[in-house]
Image (cartoon, rainbow, N blue to C red):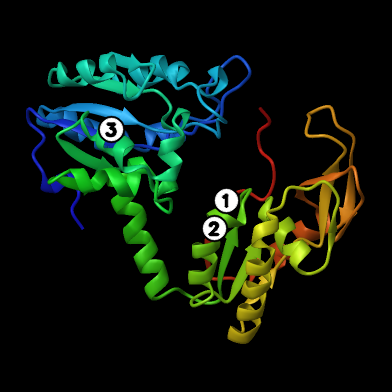
Amino acid sequence: MTTVDSLDFAGKRALIRVDFNVPLTCEFKITDDSRMTSVLPTIQKILNDGGSVVLMSHLGRPKGGPEAKYSLRPLVSHLAAITGTEVMFSDDCISKEAFETSTNMTPGSIHLLENLRFYKEEESGDSSFAASLAKHGDIYVNDAFGTAHRAHASTAIVASFFKQKCFGYLMAKEVANAKKLMNNPDRPFTSIVGGAKVSDKILIIENLLNIADHIIIGGGMAYTFSVAKGGQIGNSLFEADRVEKCAEILKKAEAKGVQIHLPQDNIIADAFSNEANTQLCDSGAIPDGWMGLDIGEKAIKSFSEVLLKSKTILWNGPMGVFEMT
């Protein structure tokens, strides 16, 4: 595994894929900067070498182009504060002006690009878009573990345009921990898998079937599994084109002796709003006009019982909605 310690960044521009998908208030204030502070060691190593840094990230899930609420501009002042360095910002990640800024950078400087997902080519893994992004740097560094499972232009594709590429400290640490965990976990080994979409976590779940003793599934993806079991989910988020895959996963788990735990109940709401009416409801019996937004009291109790008996726990993704935009 090549890491930043293996390379000398003196006089070089490092194009770093980071995960700055941080929660923001309605006033665009950062409520948790851990995703930013976690990559500081990588940034500082490169700057200390005498290199410069171009940072690229996504924020949220913009639809159809730029949206002010998903701009990375509000992060600039905080990034400058935690790095102790002035941060330049480009409001278009592949504009002529952005390329000129990156080209004219001096050692010790930082350039933050606007949200990659303002271009649909990012998520589709477009090669031409990746080639454009590659113009920003001499060395590619991936330090975005949270997006490592996605074959997007800024991750898997852009790396092919660089002779020199490596992992940042955060990525290297997470990969090393994952290898240790997967090769020889203390048992019982329980994995918690959450998040909005099954499609984002299918590969993770299928790999876990070969190593885990228990898999706890929550978040929006749990409703697709509920449909696969014949449950009623009202207006809850689910992926119709993944129902068959969920049914297949449930059968594989049974065959392998892996226990999959789905929520027994949910907190449901009549709208996706902080002002919505809410109540508890048994899973698989959510009425029309209501949507599941979190796990319920029974689910918390049953999941906790499993976790208390576990010797190894791997957690990936939230069990319910944690922000509303």
What's the amino acid at mark 3?
A: Leu
Q: Could you tell me which residue is drawn at 46 percent across and 28 percent down?
A: 118
Residue under numbered circle 1: 317
Q: Are marks 2 and 1 in contact (CB under 8 Å)?
A: yes
Please say if 88 is above or below 232: above
- How many neighbours does mark 1 have within 10 angstroms: few (below 14), some (14-19), or many (20 or more)? some
Q: Nearer the viewer, residue 312 or 93?
A: 93
Which is nearer the N-term, disc 1 or disc 3?
A: 3
Residue under numbered circle 2: 201
Q: CA distance from mark 2 to mark 3?
A: 26 Å
Q: Nearer the viewer, residue 260 or 101?
A: 101
Q: Nearer the viewer, residue 79 or 119?
A: 119
Task: Report x, y in % for residue 95.
Answer: 31, 19
Q: Is residue 85 visible?
A: no
Could you say which disc has been placed on residue 133 in the image?
A: 3
**Circle 2 SS class:** loop
Which is nearer the N-term, disc 2 or disc 3?
A: 3
Residue 226, quarter of the rendered image: bottom right
Task: Report x, y in % for residue 111.
Answer: 28, 21
Could you say which disc has been placed on residue 277 in the image?
A: none
- How many neighbours does mark 3 have within 10 angstroms: few (below 14), some (14-19), or many (20 or more)? many
Please say if 319 is above or below 62: below
What's the amino acid at mark 1?
A: Gly
Q: CA distance from mark 2 to mark 1?
A: 9 Å
Task: Report x, y in % for residue 73.
Answer: 44, 17
Give the label, 1 or 3, closer to the camera. Answer: 3
Which is nearer the N-term, disc 2 or disc 1?
A: 2
